[in-house]
Each structure stands twice: as structure tokens, then as C-alpha cells.
Image: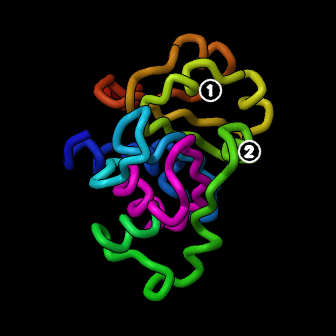
Amino acid sequence: MNDYQKERFTKQMVKSMLNTVTGKKIAILGYAFKKDTGDVRETPAMFVVRDLLKEGALIHIYDPQVSREDMWIEMDYTCGINRQNTPKIEESIVTSPDAYSACEGAHAFAVLTEWDEFKDLDFKRIFHSMAKPAFVFDGRNILDHDMLRSLGFEVYAIGKPFKDDFK
């Protein structure tokens, strides 16, 4: 994701969710820069999280290789966001032990790293555990969007037209 895509992606998330994410739980699936690493340097996920945090979202992050401490170090280094200058950041950004707990009760989930395990999740289980309407934002275009829509998700994907683009 380039800078424009990161900003547009976050704005589309907010717009799609009735123009506000304040107080809404959003699951972030993947925080690493790319799959199969724990590298968080300049990760696009960090900028999406930063912007959602500014909008008042409650963010639950799951990444199979990124530690919470590495996430905080990079957020502070690159974005200047840390525990000292951002009140209630510990409550606003939670790290989850798996994708299912991250998504439980969420209004939306966003795939921001192309981990293979995200393709094989039990999306029916996830849909039933989420608040409705349930939104999916696929920032890596790795999911089966037609299948997700058939389960009842509202699906948006980077680089693909959004349904509102035609109005």
C-alpha cells in the first residue's frame, strides 16, 4: 500500500461504517510489513491503526509473528504515538491471541498482511461472532469476496471499486 492507498483505505472504512468508527471494535488481521516475518518497519498496518485510533475506534490486532512490544516501538518511532502522549492507548489497542478472538464482537475486520492462515479462516464462525452489519476490508486482496458476501458480510477491497463509487 502506498501513502495514498493507506489514507483512502482508512477513509473508506470510516465512510462505509456510517461515517463513524468511534467506540466500534475493529479487528486488524496482520500487522507485519509482509507475511512470514515479524518486520514492522514502515508497515502499512501501523498507519491504518493510527488513523483509526484518531477516529476513536477500539482496535484488536492479531498477527502471528509480531510482538506487542515491537508494535509499540515502531508506533512511537514512526508515528510518535506512545503510552505517554496518547491517553488510554492500552485500552484502545488490544493484541489478540488469534483471529477469532480479535473478530469476536467486532463491527469490522481488515486484512492488512497477506498471511496464508487468513485465507483459511472459518468465516461463517467469524460472521456469527461479529456485530451486524459485519464489514470486511481486504487490504491485500487475498480473500474470496463472493463467498464472504454470500455469508452476509459487507466487503470492500483495495484496488476494487466500492459499491458507492457508482452512485
**Residue to which mark 2 is pinned:** 101
82 inside magenta stretch: no
**Helix, strand or loop status at disc 1:** loop
Residue shown at the point (45%, 62%) measured from the top left: 70
**Residue to which mark 1 is pinned:** 153
- State how the image is colored: rainbow
Q: In which quarter of the image is residue 112?
A: top left
Q: How far apart are marks 2 and 1 (CA)?
A: 18 Å
59 up-or-down from 98: above or below: below
- The residue segment tinted magenta is 45-70
**Helix, strand or loop status at disc 2:** helix
Picture coordinates of residue 126, whole percent (x, y): 72, 31
Picture coordinates of residue 26, whole percent (x, y): 59, 50
Residue shown at the point (36%, 52%) measured from the top left: 40
Q: In which quarter of the image is residue 21?
A: bottom right
Picture coordinates of residue 16, whole percent (x, y): 48, 42
Circle 1 crowding by C-alpha within 10 Å: few under 14, some 14–19, many from 20 = many
Q: How many labels does the image show?
A: 2
Residue shown at the point (65%, 72%) measured from the top left: 91
Which amino acid, mark 2?
Ser
Which amino acid, mark 1?
Phe
55 inside magenta stretch: yes
From this viewpoint, which residue is outermost toward the bottom?
84
Residue shown at the point (57%, 51%) measured from the top left: 61
Q: CB under 8 Å between callouts 2 and 1?
A: no
